[in-house]
Image: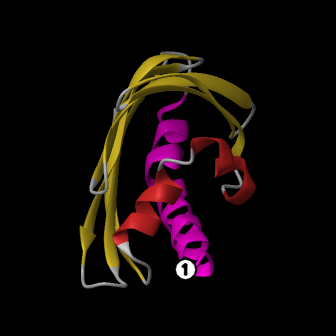
Amino acid sequence: MAGATKSVDINAPIEKVYAIVVDYEKYPEFLDEQTGAKVLSRNGNIVEVSFKLKVVKEIEYKLRLVETAPTELSWTLIKGEMMKVNNGGWKLEALGADKTRATYSVELGLGMLVPKSIATLLAETTLPKTLDAFKRRAEAAK
């Protein structure tokens, strides 16, 4: 299994950063690998979302997300092509009125026929790009 954790400081209030993190259906607008996202159900702070991701080929997966506004989002995999595990989350910390530290963690386990290098690519290589995309989105939304 591959996993990674990374933090970034964002020049935006925690509420604005959180609003972008939980606006799942807008992910394809600013995340290059994300080709689709659809909220399937919402029950209080529990949300099920279907995502489409293009890495080597397009894959679809469904996550159960637990929202704890405005500081945390965690998820677990419901089901996914090529994925056995996809757990992770966001932790947001206010560093003043207009600055937020965002920490993103992910743990991935892919199917037996998928090379470990793909899991490592997803967990470690795309993580900085993902954080940078969220940072740019939040800072541009001021």
Quadrant in the picture for the N terminus: top left
- Amino acid under disc 1: Glu
In the visual, does 29 lie left or right of 126?
right
In which quadrant of the rendered view does residue 2 lie?
top left
Q: Which is more toward the observer, 11 or 115?
A: 11
The location of residue 80, given as percent across then percent down, is: 55, 18
The location of residue 137, given as percent across then percent down, is: 60, 70
Q: Residue at 59% x, 66% y: name it.
A: 133
- Against 3, residue 128 (above or below) is below
**Residue span colored magenta:** 115-142
In which quadrant of the rendered view does residue 55 lie?
top right
In the visual, does 130 lie left or right of 44?
right
Label 1 Cα neighbours within 10 Å, binned few <14 / some 14-19 / many ≥20: some
The location of residue 71, given as percent across then percent down, is: 27, 56
Name the residue carrying label 1. 139
Q: Residue at 64% x, 49% y: name it.
A: 27
Quadrant in the picture for the C terminus: bottom right
